[in-house]
Image (cartoon, coloured by chain):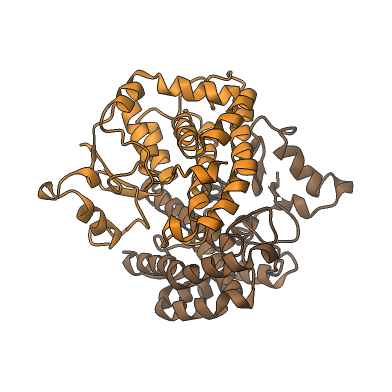
Chain colours: A orange, B brown
Amino acid sequence: MAYELYYWPGIQGRGEFVRLALEQAGADYVDVGRGSKADGQGVPALTAFLEGDATTRAPFAPPFLKDGDVVVGQTAAILMHLGPKLKLTPKAEADRLWVHQIQLTIADLTAEAHDSHHPVGLSLYYEDQKKEAAKRSKEFRKQRIPKFLKWLETILAANPAGDQWLVGDKLTYADLSAFQVVQGLLYAFPKATKKTLKETPKLAALAVRVAEQPRIKAYLESDRRLPFNEEGIFRRYAELDS
Amino acid sequence: MAYELYYWPGIQGRGEFVRLALEQAGADYVDVGRGSKADGQGVPALTAFLEGDATTRAPFAPPFLKDGDVVVGQTAAILMHLGPKLKLTPKAEADRLWVHQIQLTIADLTAEAHDSHHPVGLSLYYEDQKKEAAKRSKEFRKQRIPKFLKWLETILAANPAGDQWLVGDKLTYADLSAFQVVQGLLYAFPKATKKTLKETPKLAALAVRVAEQPRIKAYLESDRRLPFNEEGIFRRYAELDS
C-alpha cells in the first residue's frame, strides 16, 4: 500500500524532508495535500486528521504520514519510522540514534530559519515584523548558521567511515535533510550561507553528492519539487541577508 | 554503571525532562554539570564533549547523556534511548513512536516558551528585547499555550486505555514531560496558564498525578530539584503575562 504524506500544498516546508526520503527510496507515495478534493484529497483530508476525526492519535501539525494503520506526525519521528523501511538508516541501534539526533538538530536549525522572518508572531505577516526580523536575522546569519553548519562539518570530518556521508558509509535520511537545509539557507540567505559553506567544504560537497543521486536528481527536475517561495520556511528577503 | 547527565548547572532547562525520567525510575545517575571540577565534573566536563574532545559524536548542545559508550544529545532522543531501559515507554513499536511524537511536540512548546522572552536574539539580554518579547508573548499566551495544552487534553480524552496517562495505561516519559511543561508554564505565565488549565481538566489532573508519584514527590522536595528562575527556559516576567 502506498504511503500517504499529508502536508500543506504550495510549499516545500517541513514536508520536503519526508518527500526527499520517499523519493530517494523510490517509494510509492501519495502527496495527499496536493491531490484534488474530488479524490478525497487536498486540504480537507489534512484537517480531518488534525481535528481528530480520522484517528485517535491526531498529530499536532503537518507533516504527518499514514502508513497502513499508523499515523505519525513530527518530521523527525516520521523519518525515524521510515528509515528502516526505506533503508535510509543504519542497522545498529546506536547509529540509528545518532542519525536521529542529527535530524533533530537540523529540525532546530529549520525552526530558527523560520523564526528569522517571523520572530514575534506566527500569526502576523512578515511585513508586520520587518524590524524585528532584521534583528533576529542578523544573529542568525552571523552566529547560528555558522554554528549549525560547522557542527555538521565536524561530524563529516570525525566520521570513522569517511567524510562522504554523515553516519557510516551509506547515505541516510540525515544526509538528505542536510542537503535540504543547505538548499533552503542558500535560497533564503545566499550571501551568508555561501560565506559559511566556504569554511565547511565537506558539507558543501555532501550537498552536491546528494543532489547527484539519480532519484534525487530526477525529483529535483520534476514538477513534484516545488520551488522555494515566500510562503515557506526558507524565504528570500534581500534585506535580511545583508 | 551510573548514567551521566550533562547539563548546565543552575537551571532546570531542558535537562529537567531527563532528570524527571531518571528520578521516576530511581536510576543511578550523576548530574555532571553540577559536580565539582575537582572530581572531573562541572562545566569543563561538558565543554570537552561539545568541543569534540571526548567523542567523535559531539552533541550540538546540552543536555546530553553518557550511557556507557553511547553519548546522546537532544532531549527527545535521550528520552527515546532511556525509555525502554527505564520502563517509561510501552512495548509496542507504534506506541513508542506515539510517545516520542508527543515528546517532540512538547519540545516545540518548550522552544516557543523560551522564545517568548528571547524572540529576536539568543545572545541578547531580555532587557534588550522587552518590547519584542511583549509582542511575541501575547500571541504565545492567547494562541499557542491553549493550542498545545488542548492538544494534550485531546490525547488524554481519546486514549482508549483511559484518561489517566497520555499513552496506554501506564506512566511514560511523555507524562513526565507534560507535567514539566505545565509546571514551567504555570511559573512563567501563571494567569494565562491557569485560565487554559480550567479548559483542560484532564491535563491538569495528569500534572497532579505525576507530582504525586512517590519518587517524583521526593525529588521535587529534594535539593536536586532546582527552583525555576530567570536564567532558564521558563521565566516569570509579570509584564509578559498580562
Q: Nearer the viewer, residue A28 or B26?
A: A28
Residue at 59% x, 57% y: name it: B120
Residue at 63% x, 47% y: name it: A139
Q: Is residue A168 visible?
A: no
Q: Is residue A63 above or below residue A213?
A: below
Image quarter of residue A23: top left
In the figure, is residue A109 to the left or right of B151?
A: right
Query: In the orientation shown, which residue stands out farthest toward the right?
Result: B38
Image quarter of residue B72: top right
Image quarter of residue A215: top left
Query: In the orientation shown, which residue stands out farthest toward the left?
Result: A38
Q: How many dots with numbers? A: 0
Q: Nearer the viewer, residue A110 or B136?
A: B136
Q: Is residue A19 above or below residue B74?
A: above
Residue at 54% x, 37% y: name it: A102
In the figure, is residue A234 to the left or right of B124?
A: left
Q: Is residue A183 above or below residue A15?
A: above
Quarter containing the C terminus of chain B: bottom right
Quarter containing the N terminus of chain B: top right
In the figure, is residue A186 to the left or right of B233?
A: left
Expressed as whole percent of the image width and height from the top left, the position of residue B159 reads 34, 64
Expressed as whole percent of the image width and height from the top left, the position of residue A40 reads 14, 50
Expressed as whole percent of the image width and height from the top left, the position of residue A7 reads 30, 47
Expressed as whole percent of the image width and height from the top left, the position of residue B42 reads 80, 49
Q: Nearer the viewer, residue A16 or B20?
A: A16
Q: Is residue A73 visible?
A: yes
